[in-house]
Amino acid sequence: WACWKTYLGRPESNGFRCMALGALGEALLRNPTSRLEEALPLLEASLALRRRYCDETAILVAQNNLATCLGQLERHDEALVVFRAIYARRAVILGDSHDRTISSGNNVAAVLLKIHQWDEAKTLLRDKLRPVARRSLGPDHHTTI
């Protein structure tokens, strides 16, 4: 909280303020004592600020943190919507064979498995992600394996 309080008085468009809010939300998200309910509104606010003032890469990072939090709160349907949007956007920006795009696709598949959408997860992993990962990252890369 100290970091956030340091930048709170700055204009909302200030980059340090945006980063501090995101850092606080991410710290609560990754906290081993599970402070997810506290993290969620901060991650939502961070995403809103980044949508107004930051580039698309920063927005995708904030969306990923939000989706991760939603998933950990077992709000899987909401997390899936966000993870799908991230995957689709990264495919457009970076291409299907970029490691971040493949990782985003893996996030979609992981949520599909959690909500027992076995066929869709299997199709995504087997028919799309695995072949692309093998071609672009190689058969021995940790993502491919």
Image (tube, rainbow, N blue to C red):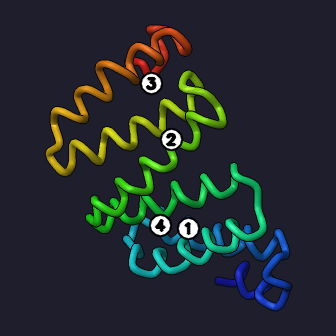
Between the residue at mark 3 and the residue at mark 4, the CA separation in whole angstroms equals: 23 Å
Q: Disc 2 marks which residue?
A: 88
Sequence-earlier tag: 1 or 2: 1
Q: Is residue 1 above or below residue 111?
A: below
- Which amino acid does the dot numbered 2 rest on? Ala
Q: Disc 4 marks which residue?
A: 29
Q: Disc 1 marks which residue?
A: 27
Sequence-earlier tag: 2 or 3: 2
Identify the residue at horizontal 85%, vertical 85% (top origin).
10
Sequence-earlier tag: 3 or 1: 1
Q: Secondary structure at mark 2?
A: helix
Between the residue at mark 2 and the residue at mark 3, the CA separation in whole angstroms equals: 19 Å
Sequence-earlier tag: 3 or 4: 4
Mark 3 near mark 4, Cβ–Cβ under 8 Å? no
Mark 4 near mark 1, Cβ–Cβ under 8 Å? yes
Location of the N terminus (image quadrant): bottom right
Q: Nearer the viewer, residue 131 or 18?
A: 131
Give the quadrant of residue 113.
top left
- Which amino acid does the dot numbered 1 rest on? Ala
The tag on residue 143 is 3
